[in-house]
Image (cartoon, helix red, strand yellow):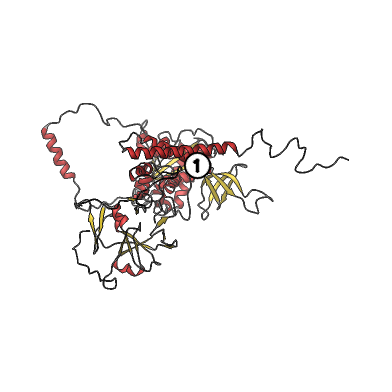
Amino acid sequence: MQRAERKHSRKSTTAQEPSIVMDSAATSTVLRESDKKHVTVLKDVSNKVYRNANGTTSKAGNKALLPFNIRGVAREADVVPSLAMNSLLSTSKLADENYVTIFTKDEVKVFDAETAKLSIEGKAIMKGWRCPETGLWRVPLTAEMVNLNTDTAILSSEATKIILGKRQNMNTNEYANSVYELPNLEQVVAWYHAAAGYPTKATWLSAIDAGFYATWPLLTAKAVRKHFPESDEVTKGHSRRVKSGVRSTKAQVQEHPEIQEAEKILAQLRRKHNDVYIQVREATEMAYTDQTGRFPVVGTGGYKYIMVLVELDGNYIAMEPTKSKETDELIRVYTIIMDRLKQQGIQPKHQILDNEAPEDYIKAIEERGLTWEKVPPHNHRRNIAEKGIQTAKGHIIANITGCDEHFPMREWPKLLPQIELTLNMLRASNVRPTVSAHMYVHGVHDYNKMPLAPLGCATQCFVGPNQRRSFGAHSMDSWYIGTSSEHYRCHKVIVKETRAERTTDTIVFRHKRVTNPSVSAANTVVAAASQLTDAIQGNMKNELQHANINELERLADIFQTAAMKISEEAAQSPRVDNATTPPRANNAAPTPRVPAASSS
């Protein structure tokens, strides 16, 4: 902290000067209600719950910023209304931002390790370590650590770092002494990524930074950068051929010195200045239309193609399934799309068509009061709808590949409404770049009112008492096909047994990757022991001290022994009895569980 040093009397009290207690046992900085006037209180409300040293919990209130010139999380704090004694400043957060805190008999000082140089002479009389799970510092309570237990091993800090360095899913709980965040942020990001239609990382981050996902709880650009799931659906739907000229081995031609000097001058002219430029852009009120190729599977209702319309002002892509490319069918689907836009107040006045548009189709456009124009022959690049089709197809493919393996693919037309919604949430409007294309046409999408889920996901749909038989199952197998725009927090599903569409407000999702099924405790222990053993043995070749290698070898033996013991016990008492043991239901039945009626 770069502040003028002041002499603090040891007899000074908090009543004389506002102060905060430096606490190395708190993983987050917490403030009393009475100290709010000394900090900057934010409008955001913290979702943290504090676990106190006596085991009780306290819910946090508003977030706040400390009045110190310090970096990042070290300046962040939470107001806790139930905190009575002292506000606590976490030295753990200071350490995370590379600050060094020194306590002496009379004072405490904080130095910036990036700018200050500290010199210490003499040997430390006590040495401990920082727990990677809680972020708190610990020292051993015994002078000598002796291990007499054959089932455990005491590791040095170096060996502990090797083991914990292999853990990918670290415990996110914090202890104020402790703070824990209820949701698992990695799972939240994976779920949102699937619900958003498996966009690429760059596209998704651009949309989040622009505020298009402001109503999606806990979804931030920082969380996505840290936990973005590199799923196969992204590669299958959005991969492109590598551009030519990247890391080229071709010898570069040396440019003339005068050309190089001119390029330097141009670079200076292009340099950004703190100037403000105003540009007035008139609405073009134009639309581009085209049809995709044939879909691999004929959809329910006989749908084989998709008509794509790009509304240029909103940069909005509208999609509707079509049964054929006959004139009457094209006019019917075109009317549906234009009526949808008109209902939202969007009425294009000029339309660009493919060069092969039928005459009756053109007459239908003229009857709606639109002027029209065809693209040049054999030059489809002039039709923006061609690029819209490419973008839409990539998004459709990503969603289709993310469906459950048993999802009936002939139901693909029912997935298009949510595919259109998620696609346009990723696109910025042309006339209003600060809003998404979806917002430009339909307004703000509130995730709390209309939640989204991964399309084609296997689900369990609730069956109410009035819809099920006596002793009937309370849910039925189904697949998710989209959110319901006509209901509050309702989902549309296809029932597996009847293939009928149903709207429900109570549903359980069984996504193939995000919501994994649970496994038995024995399998979990065996898998964990095997993974830890591999992690330990994989680091044996590192340049370690001999004592650390012995510790790791001992720990590997313990896990291998435990895994073998559990496997042997599981083999001796299987969940399903073999034929050599008495069956649960006797077929021969010399002494049946329910006595047979006498024939006499």
Q: Is residue 423 above or below residue 75?
A: above
Q: Classify 10 Å Cα crowding around label 1: few (below 14), some (14-19), many (20 and above).
A: few
Residue reaching furthest to the bottom: 15
Q: Is residue 92 visible?
A: yes
Q: Residue at x 66, y 50 (%)?
A: 468
The spot of residue 509 in percent (x, y) is 52, 46
Residue reaching furthest to the left: 258
In the figure, is residue 103 to the left or right of 495?
A: left
- Mark 1: which secondary structure? helix
Q: Residue at x 41, y 36 (%)?
A: 534
Residue type pointed to by label 1: Thr
According to the image, label 1 marks what residue? Answer: 524
Q: Viewer-proximal residue, 280 or 512?
A: 512
Residue 555: quadrant of the picture: top left
The spot of residue 358 in percent (x, y) is 46, 35
Residue reaching furthest to the right: 600
Identify the image quadrant of the C terminus.
top right
